[in-house]
Structure formats: C-alpha cells, structure tokens
C-alpha cells in the first residue's frame, strides 16, 4: 500500500497526462517510452499501465515546444467542435423537414397486434415458448404503452429514418427529436393514445 502511494506521488498515468492537455502524439513525441509500467489495479486482464515521472513531465510542460503543440491541439479541438456543431445543426434541420408517415388502423386491431408482438419479444427475451398475455392480464397504462410502441415501430417510417441517423454526428439529439416528432404525429392520428404519446415525450 505504501509502495502504491509512492508511485502515485512520483508518477502520472497516460489518463492523467491527457487531463493536463497532452495528446497521444505529444506523449509519443515528447515523452517517448514510459518510465514505469505496472499492473492495472482495477482490471487484471487490462494491459499494464504506462507511468511517467512527474518531474520529467513538469520540466517538459515548461518548454516552448510543449506550449506550442498544446496550443495547436486546442485550436484543432475547437475547430473539430465547430464542425461537429454544424453537422449536428444540419441533421436537426433535416429532422424538421421530413414527413412522418403513420398508417391508420382500427384501435382494437392495434391492441391485438401489440399484445401479440409483446408476447413474442418478451418470450424471446425470457426464453419462454408460447408466452401468452391477454388483454385482461394487462392494465390500461401498460396496454397504451405497448400499443404506442407497436405503432412507432411497425406503422410508421421510424425504423427507416433511424437507419439514416446511424453513424451521423449529433445522432443522439436527432434521435430524441425524431422520436418526439413521431410520437406527436401518432397522437394526432390516434387521439385515444394521445396521453401515452405525450407521456413518452416527457
């Protein structure tokens, strides 16, 4: 324990360097090989931790070359953030522009299909064959939820639109916006499920 405490005071990890503004290329160029490698104290199967003498790190951080590289790195980071922001803004505008298609169907038929769909998927998850819940087994709030979920995944163009978001910058915020837009449209087409749609939007 005392030995570990000495190491913590004398050395700094790669993660610690990055928290101080170092990048991988800066570490390779200015520090080179680590001064010490130790077993990862948190994950036994993880690679050994690379440690660097803090005295050496402090000395290099005071050099002109370090300050120059750090400034360039910060500028690149800011530029990348601006590009990402622009891409996300463009994606959100695209979500605003798309038309949401919701197929109209009898509410009782949707209820039946939603229950069948729930039984199928839940049975697969729990490894239960012929899992059967009927309407009388489910309360109204739960029924409304699985009905809205069924409509969203099966009676709209939601799944196709999700594929378009895959790999795009800003997809998390775009996904939230898309889901809410579709829920709002479902509430218009199926007024009986409006409360559940707005509940899911919250």
Image (cartoon, rainbow, N blue to C red):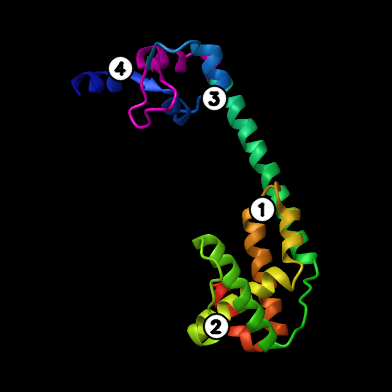
Between 152 and 22, the residue placed more toward the observer is: 152
Residue 138 at x, y percent in the picture: 50, 82
Which numbered disc, 1 or 3, marks the residue closer to the eye?
1
- Between the C-alphas of marks 1 and 3, the distance is 26 Å
Instruction: Report how far apart the C-alphas of labels 3 and 2 lie in the structure.
Output: 58 Å
Mark 2 = which residue? 134
- Mark 4 or mark 3, which is nearer the start of the sequence? 4
Within 10 Å of the Cα at label 4, are there few (<14), some (14-19), or many (20+) other Cα atoms? Answer: few
Query: Of 61 and 46, which appears nearest the observer?
Result: 46
Q: Is residue 169 above or below residue 97?
A: above
Instruction: Please report whichever mark, 3 or 2, sits nearer to the chain's N-terminal start.
Output: 3
Q: Magenta stretch: give its range.
A: 38-66
Mark 4–mark 2 contact, CB under 8 Å? Answer: no
Residue at which label 1 appears: 171
Q: CA distance from mark 4 to mark 1?
A: 42 Å
Residue 87 visible in the displayed image: yes
Quadrant, the N terminus = top left
Which comes sooner in the sequence, label 1 or label 3? 3
> Counting residues from the N terminus, which is met first, the one under dot 2 or under dot 1?
2
10 Å crowding of disc 3: few (<14), some (14-19), many (20+): some
Q: Is residue 181 visible?
A: no
Q: Secondary structure at mark 1?
A: helix
For label 3, the residue is 23
Which-is-in-front pick, marks 4 and 2?
Answer: 2
Label 4 sits on residue: 10
Residue at left 70%, top 46%? 167
């Amino acid at each position: 324990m005392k030995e570990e405490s000495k190491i913590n005071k004398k050395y700094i990890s790669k993660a610690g360097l990055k928290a101080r503004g170092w990048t991988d290329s800066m570490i390779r160029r200015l520090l080179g090989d680590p001064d010490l490698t130790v077993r990862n104290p948190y994950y036994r199967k993880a690679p050994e931790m690379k440690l660097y003498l803090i005295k050496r790190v402090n000395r290099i951080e005071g050099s002109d070359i370090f300050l120059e590289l750090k400034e360039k790195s910060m500028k690149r980071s800011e530029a990348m953030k601006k590009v990402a922001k622009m891409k996300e803004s463009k994606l959100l505008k695209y979500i605003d522009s798309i038309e949401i298609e919701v197929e109209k169907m009898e509410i009782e038929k949707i209820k039946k299909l939603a229950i069948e769909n729930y039984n199928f998927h839940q049975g697969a998850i729990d490894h239960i064959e012929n899992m059967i819940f009927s309407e009388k087994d489910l309360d109204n709030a739960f029924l409304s939820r699985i009905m809205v979920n069924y409509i969203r995944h099966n009676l709209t163009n939601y799944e196709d639109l999700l594929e378009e978001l895959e790999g795009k910058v800003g997809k998390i915020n775009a996904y939230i916006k898309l889901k809410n837009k579709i829920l709002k449209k479902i509430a218009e087409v199926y007024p009986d499920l409006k409360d559940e749609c707005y509940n899911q939007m919250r």
